[in-house]
Structures are given as C-alpha cells and as structure tokens.
Amino acid sequence: MWKIIVLCIVITGLAADMIRYDQYKVISVVPTTSFQLRLLQELKNSNQYSFWQGPSLGKEALIMVSPRMLTQFFGTLDDSDMLYKIRIDNVQKLVDNTMPNNNQSWGFDFNSYHTLEEIYSYLDVLAANFSKKCSVVVAANKTYEGREIKGVKIINGEENPGIFIEGGMHGREWISPATVMYILHELLFSNQFRCEI
C-alpha cells in the first residue's frame, strides 16, 4: 500500500511541476475513545490533512501533515490525550527514494518519449549489465511492420511465481512503455530485489 501511495504522490508531483513534500510528516494515531474518533473524523473533513488511512476506533489512522500545520496538529492531539507516532519523518525523502537514480539509469529518461529502438537498446544494456539475472527474450512472432517483439526475463529464484507486465500496445502511448521500463528498472535496482551485476 505504501508504494501505491508514494506512486500516487510521485505521479501527482510529475503532473504539477514536481510538487514537493519536504518536511511533510506521516503520523500514526490510534483513537481509543469515541471522542478521539470524532475529532479525527472532523480533521479529515476539514481537508487540511491528507488521510492515507482513515480513522476507526482502535485502529491506526495514517495522516500526512504539512510543516505549516504540524504545531496545530500536535496541539490537537495533545489536548485530546491521543497518542501518536511519527511513521515518516520526511515524505519528500521517501518520494525521492522511489525515483530512479540517474547514476544507475545509464542515460534512460523515464519522463520522456522513447522510440522502440531506444527502448530495445536500453533492454540490451540492462541484460548485458545484469547477465546473471536478466536476459532479453524475443517473441516468435513479429509486429505488423515486421519488427521483433522484445522483452526481458528476470529470474529471482526458479521456484518463485512469474508475472507478465506488458506496455506499448498502442503506438502513441508513451506513458505505458515508460511505466513498464520504470518497473523493470526498480526490480533490478531496488533494495528488495537487488540483482547482481
């Protein structure tokens, strides 16, 4: 769920000239009384805070708070004897950590349109640099124009289930191939997966 929320923040940021979330915090609060629950519902309805997970009695609510609202927010929690925990100290740092590291992208820009040749060339670069875990595969069939249909196979243990991610079915869709390429990049470079070069 966190990655989906962060992806939404990233997409929102890209669409609006890179909105920044410096020093925004995500606060965990568990309302234990009906008064505390009503208070959190009022805060949610005020639209001054971004609730990542809504409030319910005895369950954790996750609330993103802007730096300018922190003092007021903490005061409200203290006045109602609500216990809280800071789950994310700086949302922008989390967003930055989800963006591709330009040093590792070998010049591939995930925010631009790329030709099929450029995408295939990048697939070849990734396969060459991650040869132990990543290989280029070519479909038996060709496109209507007689072009090869290439993909990448990533192996992270033979016993693990496989998934198939596809993009670029329509000629003028640039976001679909960019999204698939970004997912591929994250699979290869993320700390959870970490292929060996």
Image (cartoon, rainbow, N blue to C red):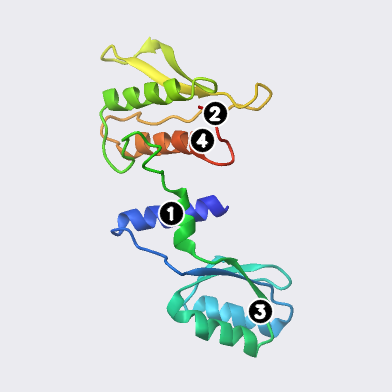
Asked whether residue 196 is in view, the answer is: yes
Element marked by disc 1: helix
**Tag shown at residue 196:** 2
**Which amino acid does the dot numbered 2 rest on?**
Glu
Please indicate whether residue 73 sits to the left or right of residue 148 in the image.
Answer: right
- Mark 4, Cα crowd under 10 Å, few <14 / some 14-19 / many 20+, is some
Q: Residue at x 64, y 86 (%)?
A: 78
For disc 4, the marked residue is 187
Q: Is residue 74 above or below residue 101?
A: below
Q: Nearer the viewer, residue 59 or 137?
A: 137
Name the image quarter holding residue 61.
bottom right
**Which amino acid does the dot numbered 1 rest on?**
Asp
**Which amino acid does the dot numbered 3 rest on?**
Leu
Mark closer to the chain start, 3 or 4: 3
Q: CA distance from mark 2 to mark 3?
A: 48 Å
- Mark 1, Cα crowd under 10 Å, few <14 / some 14-19 / many 20+, is some
For disc 1, the marked residue is 96
Asked whether residue 8 is in view, the answer is: no
**Which amino acid does the dot numbered 4 rest on?**
Leu
- Look at discs 4 and 2 and give the one toward the viewer: 2
Mark closer to the chain start, 4 or 2: 4
For disc 3, the marked residue is 37
Where is residue 21? Give x, y as percent. Answer: 42, 65
